[in-house]
């Protein structure tokens, strides 16, 4: 059974940084895409960033230049470095895994989420 466990969320002031981690169990981690989605209160879940098995990355326009996604296949872990955080980045961040993760429908596995709160 595949499990995704997020960590690294918390409370930070605007302009600060956080690094989220997504640790995955199960096999064939390195042949799957892994991404981060977020969901703010009363808003739909949205894609933040993803990284393919080949290392290609993609970011939402709202986070380009501020967030960086990376993966360490030896540790079965994906990271999301978030810099210059804004109050509008406040959300529950979810790790997602699958052959593709560029749409919610394509995701095979979800983590339980980690809360990021950015104060102004």
Image (spheres, rainbow, N blue to C red):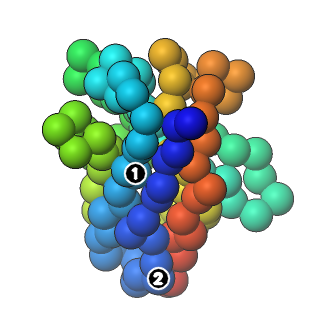
12 above or below 33? below
Q: Secondary structure at mark 2?
A: strand
Q: Secondary structure at mark 1?
A: strand
99 above or below 95? above
On the image, which quarter does residue 92 sit in? bottom right
Mark 1 Cα shell of 10 Å, populated few (<14), some (14-19), many (≥20): many
Residue at position x 39%, y 28% from top? Answer: 27
**Which residue corresponds to mark 2?**
11
On the image, which quarter does residue 112 sit in? bottom right
Image check: 113 left or right of 33?
Answer: right
**Which residue corresponds to mark 1?**
22
Residue at position x 53%, y 37% from top? Answer: 2
Image check: 114 left or right of 73?
Answer: right
The answer to whether residue 73 is visible is: yes
59 and 32: which is toward the camera: 32
Q: CA distance from mark 2 to mark 1?
A: 18 Å
Image coords of residue 37 (percent x, y): 56, 44
70 above or below 40? above
Image coords of residue 13 (percent x, y): 40, 83
38 above or below 1? below
Image coords of residue 61 (percent x, y): 45, 37
Q: Quadrant of the N terminus?
A: top right
Mark 2 Cα shell of 10 Å, populated few (<14), some (14-19), many (≥20): some
Q: Earlier in the sequence, mark 2 or mark 1?
A: 2
Foreground disc of the pair 2, 1: 1
Image coords of residue 14 (percent x, y): 40, 77
67 and 15: which is toward the camera: 67
The answer to whether residue 47 is visible is: no
Residue at position x 53%, y 76% from top? Answer: 117
């Amino acid at each position: 059974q595949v499990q995704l466990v997020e960590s690294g969320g918390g409370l930070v002031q605007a302009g600060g940084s956080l690094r989220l981690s997504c640790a995955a169990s199960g096999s064939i981690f390195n042949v799957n895409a892994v991404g981060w989605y977020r969901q703010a209160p009363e808003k739909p879940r949205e894609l933040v960033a993803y990284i393919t098995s080949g290392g290609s990355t993609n970011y939402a326009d709202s986070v380009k230049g501020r967030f960086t996604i990376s993966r360490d296949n030896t540790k079965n872990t994906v990271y999301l470095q978030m810099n210059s955080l804004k109050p509008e980045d406040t959300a529950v961040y979810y790790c997602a895994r699958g052959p593709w993760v560029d749409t919610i429908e394509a995701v095979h596995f979800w983590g339980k989420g980690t809360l990021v709160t950015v104060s102004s």
